[in-house]
């Protein structure tokens, strides 16, 4: 009987030690879940806010790795909680897993948009090549000479001013178009741009008969610069319409913020529930 009793006590001790070891493992994986989920959300936010394609891709990769770590911890923790017969903790983990699946799908959509960087690309075109084309247009026109100084000087000045001003009006509208999220508002801006473009072309055509023959080359250069500017503006509009940065940011600030909150609530509840477990809480 003494031998049997000692063996029974030893078995109970081993069972308790094993249960406590599994509880420690559960606490570790629960804490790691919260750490990796926070890393995933932070990296995804950085991808959305990044100002280069390279940075967006790098942060997206970091977010994906962290999400994989979250899933790995879920897969390890589930059987531990079932083995310990922790029904409340198992329920909390299952609820988190469901919400995390929704988070991953939403995050996938956001990151696909973020790495496109269409708004940033449109902005760079506007401030770079489009600006250069507009400046070339202005420089070419300001060099033209009236055919009759006494009669045509002020008419030429007025036509040049109109042409340059209307191109600048298009430039001014590019930045708000890039930042705009409403399609209807963007359409109205594009209509105003089309009106300005037509005015610039009309002023350019009206200059032909009132400038000296030697200035015709300047008009040809101005026309070429205008065509380049119009082509670049069309590219800017197309990129702006895609609105990947604006859309990814809107999704992050609205839908994703709610999903993150729900996920974190379950993780905090799971961590707190496991913290209360001890010898009496084991099976």
Image (cartoon, helix red, strand yellow):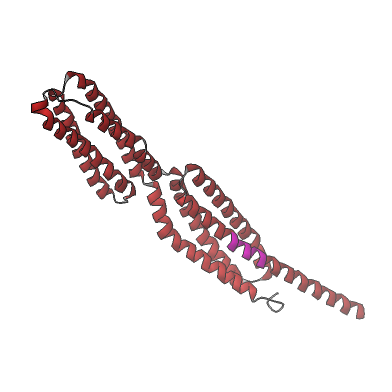
Residue 223: tell me if it is visible. Answer: yes
- Position of residue 26 measured from the top left corner of the image (x, y, whole percent): 66, 66
Decide: is 212 above or below 272: above
Count of marks overlaid on the render: 0
Picture quarter with the N terminus: bottom right
User: Would you say 157 lies left or right of 17 here?
Assistant: left
Magenta region includes residue 257: no
User: Would you say 179 lies left or right of 138 here?
Assistant: right
Q: In the depicted view, which residue is nearer to us: 118 or 97?
A: 118
Decide: is 135 above or below 2: above
Picture residue at 37% right of the left edge, 43% below the top? 123
Q: In the depicted view, which residue is nearer to us: 69 or 128?
A: 128
Q: Main secondary structure of the magenta part?
A: helix
Residue at the extreme top: 213
Residue at the extreme front: 150
Magenta region includes residue 29: yes
User: Would you say 49 lies left or right of 157 here?
Assistant: right
Picture residue at 17% right of the left edge, 18% below the top? 213
- Position of residue 245 measured from the top left corner of the image (x, y, whole percent): 40, 48
Q: Which residues are magenta?
A: 27-35
Q: In the depicted view, which residue is nearer to us: 79 or 46?
A: 46
The quarter of the displayed image where residue 216 is located? top left
Q: In the depicted view, which residue is nearer to us: 111 or 234?
A: 234
Picture residue at 20% right of the left edge, 22% below the top? 215
- Position of residue 218 measured from the top left corner of the image (x, y, whole percent): 24, 24
Picture residue at 38% right of the left edge, 45% below the top? 119
- Position of residue 86 measured from the top left corner of the image (x, y, whole percent): 64, 71
Residue 1: tell me if it is visible. Answer: no
């Amino acid at each position: 009987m003494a031998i049997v009793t000692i063996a029974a006590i030893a078995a109970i001790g081993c069972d308790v030690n094993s249960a406590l070891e599994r509880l420690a493992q559960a606490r570790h994986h629960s804490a790691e879940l919260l750490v990796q989920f926070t890393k995933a959300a932070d990296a995804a936010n950085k991808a959305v806010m990044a100002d280069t394609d390279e940075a967006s891709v790098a942060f997206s990769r970091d977010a994906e790795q962290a999400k994989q770590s979250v899933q790995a911890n879920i897969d390890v923790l589930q059987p531990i909680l079932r083995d310990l017969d922790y029904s409340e903790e198992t329920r909390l983990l299952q609820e988190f897993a469901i919400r995390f699946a929704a988070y991953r799908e939403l995050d996938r959509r956001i990151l696909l948009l973020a790495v496109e960087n269409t708004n940033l690309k449109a902005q760079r075109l506007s401030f770079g090549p489009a600006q250069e084309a507009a400046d070339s247009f202005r420089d070419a026109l300001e060099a033209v000479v009236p055919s009759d100084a006494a009669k045509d000087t002020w008419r030429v000045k007025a036509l040049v001013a109109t042409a340059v001003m209307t191109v600048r009006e298009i430039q001014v509208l590019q930045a708000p178009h890039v930042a705009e999220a409403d399609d209807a508002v963007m359409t109205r801006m594009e209509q105003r741009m089309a009106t300005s473009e037509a005015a610039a072309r009309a002023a350019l055509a009206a200059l032909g008969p009132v400038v000296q023959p030697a200035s015709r080359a300047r008009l040809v250069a101005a026309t070429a610069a205008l065509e380049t500017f119009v082509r670049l503006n069309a590219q800017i509009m197309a990129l702006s319409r895609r609105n990947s940065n604006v859309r990814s940011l809107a999704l992050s600030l609205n839908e994703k913020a709610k999903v993150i909150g729900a996920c974190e609530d379950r993780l905090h509840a799971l961590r707190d529930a496991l913290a209360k477990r001890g010898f009496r809480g084991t099976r």
